[in-house]
Image: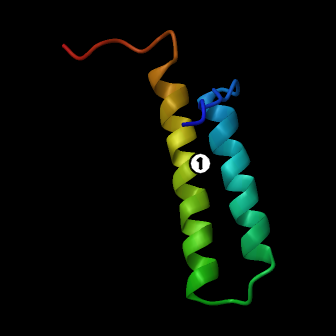
Amino acid sequence: MSARRRDERSLKERLALEAIQLREKAKRLPAGAERDELLKKARRLDVASELDNWLSSPGLKPPS
């Protein structure tokens, strides 16, 4: 078994990089279902990044 290498980048960095890569791949595709799916996934990664920002913000209060 090979040892897994830990990614030192933050979750936000990894999400942003993946979204950029998906958008670049989508640019090279003709309009259609595959391109649309890549763009949807990139948008979901953007939302995940925003949620991570919100959840890790110092002003976030626990539910009451």
> Which quadrant: the N terminus?
top right
Residue 2: quarter of image: top right
Q: Residue furthest left?
A: 64
Q: Residue at x 67, y 54 (%)?
A: 19
Number of labels in the image equals 1
Horizontal and vertical percent position of residue 21: 74, 58
Q: Residue at x 64, y 79 (%)?
A: 35
Residue 29: quarter of image: bottom right
> Which quadrant: the C terminus?
top left
Near-viewer residue (1 or 35): 1
Q: Which residue is mark 1?
A: 46
Horizontal and vertical percent position of residue 15: 62, 43
Element type where label 1 sits in the image: helix
Coloring basis for residues? rainbow
**Residue 33 shown left or right of residue 19 in the figure:** left
What amino acid is at disc 1? Asp
Q: Residue at x 59, y 32 (%)?
A: 4
Horizontal and vertical percent position of residue 14: 66, 39
Query: Is residue 22 depicted above or below 50 in this figure?
Result: below
Horizontal and vertical percent position of residue 7: 66, 29
**Residue 55 shown left or right of residue 1 in the figure:** left
Mark 1 crowd level (few <14, some 14–19, many ≥20, 10 Å Cα): some
Query: Is residue 34 depicted above or below 58 in this figure?
Result: below
Near-viewer residue (4 or 6): 4
Q: Residue at x 29, y 13 (%)?
A: 62
Query: Is residue 51 depicted above or below 33 in this figure?
Result: above
